[in-house]
Image: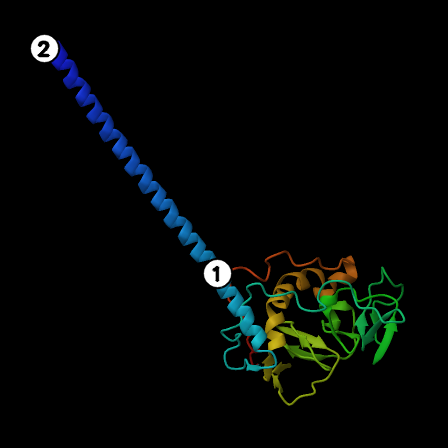
Amino acid sequence: MRSTALAASASHLHRNALGRICLKANCYLDHRTKLQRRRNRAKQTAVGLMATACLLGMAAIASAAGAQVHAADAGTAPAEVTPCNAPVPAHAEGPPIELPNGGYCYQGPHPVDTTAAAGPAWDNSPGRHTHFYPPLDLRLFAYSNDCYRFIGDPEDFGFDGQTQAYYGTHPIPDGGWCFMTGGHHHQFDPWSPQFVMVGPWLHWQGDYDASFWTAWPYYSAFHKDLYPRFYGAGKFQRDHKPAPKLPPGAWTRKGSPPPLLPPPPRRR
């Protein structure tokens, strides 16, 4: 009888211990499940907020089309402008635009890729004219009225004639923008009183429109990295290697503020 009672007591204790273990295991698993659900909800919320912020930023740029933004005071983009998902500007990449009858229209002087067209490395033809070869890099040209206008520095491509010294970003004749930072040169003369002489440089102190701010993240990255490595100081004339495309994310890094405009030159 005594042994039977002891066996029954041991069995009862064993069942109680197993019950407590199972209860703790179930509580632990339930706790882990709740934590995982919370983490998943947090991730979904964060992704949703990032996407919403990006869409709102791009919508603000689109709604600001035609608006004028004065950058002389702060040199920064307006608050609603963001490089998040900033597009590749029109005519910066892709196939060049050929005339209906063939060839490519150029407006004014421009460099020549002598590996594609034998002859001088610089074409100093004024006005509109055509060639059978396309621009050597579309990012060095502005496109308007069916023509390409060179917006780089002629002195970087072997031109040794008369130029005007400019500093920082500025508009160009016939529409469009030069996105070069720091000191550089062009063959065209200033055409607006908002070009102000600061030391030896012509500095633009006028407005920047929405088309500039939309394209600025892309061209800022191009002129910061690729232009000096492939075109600055006559490098293309020596190597004949056009710059590659900007790598993905070079101008659309998440969380990056819009790049600053270059400061004005110092007076000497």
User: In which quadrant of the rendered view does residue 121 lie?
Assistant: bottom right
Amino acid tagged 1: Met
Color encoding of the figure? rainbow
Q: Nearer the viewer, residue 72 or 104?
A: 104
Q: How many marks?
A: 2
Q: Is residue 111 above or below residue 239?
A: below
Direction front: furthest residue: 1
Residue 122 in percent (x, y) is at: 82, 70
Q: Earlier in the sequence, mark 1 or mark 2?
A: 2
Q: Is residue 242 above or below residue 32?
A: below
Residue 210 in percent (x, y) is at: 60, 77
Amino acid tagged 2: Arg
> Around disc 1, counting alpha carbons within 10 Å, would you say few (fewer than 14), some (14 to 19), or many (20 or more)?
some
User: In which quadrant of the rendered view does residue 154 lie?
Assistant: bottom right
Q: Nearer the viewer, residue 197 or 55?
A: 55
State the SS at label 2: helix
Task: Report the mark closest to the observer, 1 or 2.
Answer: 2
Q: Are marks 1 and 2 in contact (CB under 8 Å)?
A: no
Q: What residue is shown at x 60% (from left), y 79% (from top)?
A: 209
Is 15 placed left or right of 223 in the picture? left
Residue 25 in percent (x, y) is at: 29, 33
Q: Which residue is mark 1?
A: 50
Q: Which residue is mark 2?
A: 2
